[in-house]
Amino acid sequence: MSGESTIFCARIKLSLSLRMISEEVKREEGDRDARASAEFSSSNIESFLVHSMPIIVYDEDGDEDEDEDDDEDEDEDVDVGENDVDFRLGDVWNSFAETSAFGCEVPLEFQGKVIAQYYSPFVSAFQIFENDEDEDDEVDKDNKKSATAQYFESVAPYSRAPMMDVIEKLTNENEKVSSLRVSEIDLNKSWISFAWYPIYRIPQGTSRTDIQGCFLTYHGFNHLNVRRRRRRRRTTTSKNTTTTSKNSNEEENNIDIINNNNNNNNDNKTNTRQLQQKTPTSIPPPRPASLTLLGELRLLRRIEDCKKQRSDDKKPSRALALKPFGLCCYKTDPEIFFAAENENESERTAAMIDGAYAFLRGIKVIHPDYEFFSHHG
């Protein structure tokens, strides 16, 4: 073989090698772009989670004036960290003041367009347990302490009172529904569930009546970096030890489901299916699942917007999102809500659905809305 032929063959081999390297680089870039595209895209269910998530705005310095009104014999030990949080349950309810009246706007992608769908929030259930690690009396080692405040809604959605009206009535029955701070509650037992039902504007506007779907979101407190606050038992008591215990003399280990629908004429209590029970086990709520990068950016924008609305207040305020750990869906179209290219997001949604089921079964609580959703959805 001549020298020219050898050089020609070498050039061909070099050209082929360079082409293979170029194609490999393009494949890697394509995979990287696909991953980046997935991170900057989200499904409609994540859009719902981001925009329905309660944003809790509270005063950074706490309620010093109210603390001064506490009993003199009540000891308090507060260990404050730079990023510690401590807010009242009333701050959670207040985050729904606007959406309870006007609905929660959620942008959804539908048929290549972005539409605004509206959802009405309701408090579906909650159980709040006080933190008794520093109580003088003996701690119940069997984890069978009754909830300080609990509520289970069972009235049909179209017959339910607005959320803030329900909270006001429950607070009148038991002030701890709003006055307790997260530093005073058992973070591994307490939880809240909100129900979300679609509402449609008249005129219809950009909302769509053919997009159905109702949701239950479950929220815990054990993932928060809560300020440590230890107190002895208060000498004052609320009107009721729980919002569901006007029949407090009944056996504590029995489940008593009371339906007030037959007492509407002369009964001022909220129509609920009320559950009296002691939690037999202590299973903490799962930690909230992470959002996609786009979802986190949207959530940060919501948090900043909520803080700006309080910027005219004299006291500096802090804001945080109470992320859900569980989810339950009713009559949702998978092609509309769950279609996403991000496999991790699909796994996260499935984990949230499984998390709600496992949590409720673990603490052996009957949640009427969940039972209806899961059996009829």
Image (tube, rainbow, N blue to C red):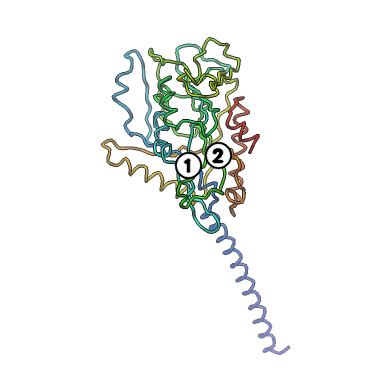
Give 349 or 60, whichever is nearer the viewer: 349
Determine the secondary structure under disc 2: strand
**Is 80 placed left or right of 254 in the picture?**
left
Q: Position of residue 19 (x, y in %)?
A: 63, 74
Residue at image coords 57%, 24%: 282
Residue at image coords 50%, 19%: 244
Which amino acid is tagged 1?
Ser
Q: Position of residue 349 (x, y in %)?
A: 59, 43
| Separation of marks 2 and 1 at Cα, in angstroms | 10 Å
Give me the disc on residue 215: 2
Q: Earlier in the sequence, mark 2 or mark 1?
A: 1
Give me the disc on residue 328: none
Q: Residue furthest top?
A: 249
Give 357 or 158, whichever is nearer the viewer: 158
**Is 15 placed left or right of 131 in the picture?**
right
Which amino acid is tagged 2?
Phe
In which quadrant is the N terminus drawn?
bottom right
Q: Residue furthest front?
A: 265
Give 85 or 149, whichever is nearer the viewer: 149
Q: In the rendered image, which quarter is residue 17 located in?
A: bottom right
Residue at image coords 69%, 88%: 5
Determine the secondary structure under disc 1: helix
Q: Position of residue 61 (x, y in %)?
A: 31, 32
Count neighbours of disc 2 (C-alpha within 10 A) and say few if under 14, some if 14 to 19, many if 20 or more: many
Q: Position of residue 373 (x, y in %)?
A: 61, 35
Q: Residue furthest left?
A: 314
Mark 1, residue position: 52
CB under 8 Å between discs 2 and 1: yes
Q: How many marks?
A: 2
Residue at image coords 39%, 28%: 88
| Whether residue 31 is situated above or below residue 204 in the rendered picture | below
